[in-house]
Amino acid sequence: MSLLLVLGPDFGSPPSFMRRKLLTLLGECGKTCSFIDDISIVKRYASESSHAIPVCSDDEALLKARKEVKNDRVHFVWTQFSELNSYFRKQAEDDLKLNGKLAEMISLLTCDKKPDKQKGIKYKISTELKEILTRIDTRVRSLHTALPANSMFIICTGHGNIAIVHRLRKMLTEQSETKIPREKLIKVLEELQAQAEVALCFIGMKN
């Protein structure tokens, strides 16, 4: 049986919460594992008994994963698609886009007339983001198609947009100059952090 995980090896949890490596535990149970990810992630999470396969792009990760899931000697295959996280990081590092995003969020929080318990940040999805999500969907479908029968298929979204959360924390800690009042930044940070901590997990069997 092949087991495939997509999008995030630690699901946003700090390293301190990772007692033992998952691949180490699987290896001790006699399960052969293939770990396909960016080289920095491979070095951090791969075990001595696993097949460590560093890749440089999502397309390469897809190619390697499709090959590994067809290997009868491999019981567990892990890969991650990082294009969405890269997009979030670039958005957070771009001062112009970040300020525009913060202004939009503050406006939504301020103008929302719903009861407080129903308030939340709901902003528009850009064309670029839609295209990224479409490509991720296509890759996931391609992986599912490559799976042999009776395989378990697990998709985990991992954490949300933590890049902007980290950027806001840094701005508040360093007291960076900004036209946005500190109290409003804190309010936006609270909302964004709550959203970033939400993850989804989908499990299915390939017939």
Image (cartoon, rainbow, N blue to C red):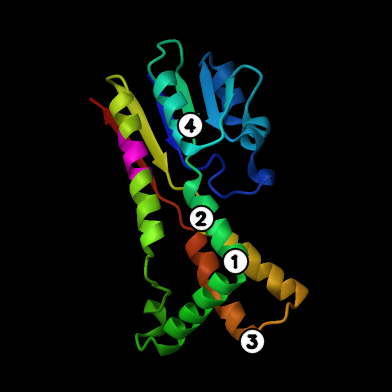
Q: CA distance from mark 3 to mark 2?
A: 25 Å
Mark 3 element type: loop
Question: The magenta stretch spans which residues?
Answer: 136-141
Measured along the vertical axis of the image, is residue 132 above or below residue 50?
Answer: below
Query: Can you give x and y, in whole percent of width and height, for residue 105 in the image?
Result: 47, 78
Q: Provide residue 18's location: percent of width, then percent of height.
A: 64, 40
Q: CA distance from mark 2 to mark 1?
A: 11 Å
Numbered tag placed on residue 179 in the rendering: 3
Q: Earlier in the sequence, mark 4 or mark 2?
A: 4
Label 3 crowding class (10 Å Cα cut-off): few <14, some 14-19, many 20+? Answer: few
Q: Which residue is mark 2?
A: 87
Report if the CB atoms under discs 2 and 1 are less than 8 Å apart: no
Element type at marker 1?
Answer: loop
Q: Residue at x 61, y 24 (%)?
A: 24
Q: Compare marks 2 and 1 and give the one earlier in the sequence.
A: 2
Q: Are marks 4 and 2 in contact (CB under 8 Å)?
A: no
- In terms of sequence position, does the residue under pointer 3 or pointer 1 come before the other? 1
Return the residue at label 4: 61
Residue in the image at 67% along x and 82% along y = 178
Q: Quadrant of residue 16?
A: top right
Query: Does the magenta portion include 140?
Result: yes
